[in-house]
Image (spheres, rainbow, N blue to C red):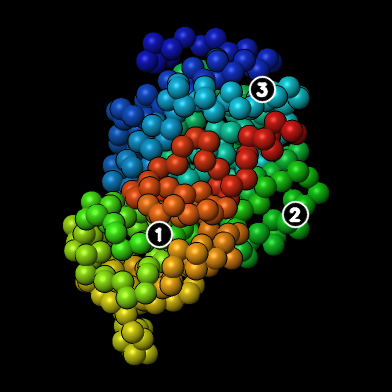
Amino acid sequence: MLLWGYKPTINMSKFIPQQYINAFSALGQQLNHPEGELRSLIQSEHLYNPWFTQQSVLDAVMAIGAMLSEENLAQWLSRYPEAGANPSKKVGLILAGNIPLVGFHDVLCVLISGHEALIKTSAQDTRLIKYVLQLLTEIEPDFAGKYQFVERLAGFEAVIATGSNNTSRYFEFYFGKVPHIIRKNRNSVALLTGNETTAQLHQLGNDIFEYFGLGCRNVSKMMVPEGYDFVPFFESIESYNEISNHHKYHNNYDYNKSIYLVNKDKHLDNGFLLVKEDTGLTSPLAVLHYETYTDLADAEQKLQAQTDNIQCVVTIANVNLNNQVVGFGQSQHPAVWDYADGVDTMRFLAAL
């Protein structure tokens, strides 16, 4: 089946970057224009996972489609001239399932670096990744022999596993003897100066609410200057109020609100988001933590102390941080060269 004018030319016994780029960019074009079975999958995924609404799945599919442009892929792969120099290895992948297709980037890295992927999906997200890889093999049939879905990892020579702080201890025990990347819980933070425009604060709403805040790149906490006025923030995000129509999100909102009221915990409430002062990075669903700072140097110091627990920082401020810094509305739209936890997956794979 020839799609989008792409002609299969890959010789899988030899690593030829441009041919890999052609195949994945053709996949990106399909994801950017979902039709037929893909469109049906986008519309029906909520029946299998209530958090995977049509809009959430479409957002994820389109974000990956944008990531897979030929220009982006060529620029990305040019950084790794050593990729494909070593014999192909079997790389076990344990994928998360908190947001749609969250494990796609790991699969992409393994395949485009010439390795074979042994994929253990999350029970929360099995259909999407399987169908996207089916599309890839329709574009380039030789990819069919480069990945397999498994119930239990075996015969792997390296592992990339994404989980929680609890599961990471088990991952370290089981996979510690082979080359590995093991990811734990992370959260993202917005650093506000008080000079943000209405448009920027509205875009921040996307960083907070996209995928219902379930992703590690979603903002779960704000750093704000002492005396910060929250009124402009609440006014700017009011248009996101339809999120409360989602029953599971609203149940979490109601539950956390009742806890705060019973415990007499001080908090702000706009009817669909609870904002509570708390130094913790991880906030409950439908809750946004905030912490104050005296000046940007103080904010930097507080953020640097949490470097290993932060995925990215959303801000317009000129700050020097070890974590990735992105603009408002961009936290859930990483480029193909933006790596989870700041660990260069391609460099890891090229060295196997």
Q: Nearer the viewer, residue 198 or 184?
A: 198
Residue carrying label 2: 174
> Is disc 2 surrounded by few (<14), some (14 to 19) or many (20+) residues within 10 Å?
few
The answer to whether any part of residue 286 appears in the image is yes
Q: Residue at x 43, y 12 (%)?
A: 6
Q: Which numbered disc covers residue 81?
A: 3
Q: Number of numbered discs present?
A: 3
Q: Is residue 165 left or right of residue 37?
A: right
Q: Residue at x 25, y 75 (%)?
A: 269
Task: Find the distance from the CA under tag 1 to the CA under tag 2.
Answer: 35 Å
Q: Residue at x 38, y 47 (%)?
A: 327
Rendering coords of residue 15 (x, y %): 65, 17
Residue type at mark 2 is Tyr
Residue type at mark 3 is Pro
Task: Find the distance from the CA under tag 2 to the CA under tag 3.
Answer: 32 Å
Q: Which numbered disc covers residue 190?
A: 1
Q: Residue at x 37, y 24 (%)?
A: 29
* Nearer the camera: disc 2 or disc 3: 3
* Nearer the camera: disc 1 or disc 2: 1
Q: Nearer the viewer, residue 66 or 243?
A: 66
Q: Is residue 33 left or right of residue 326?
A: left
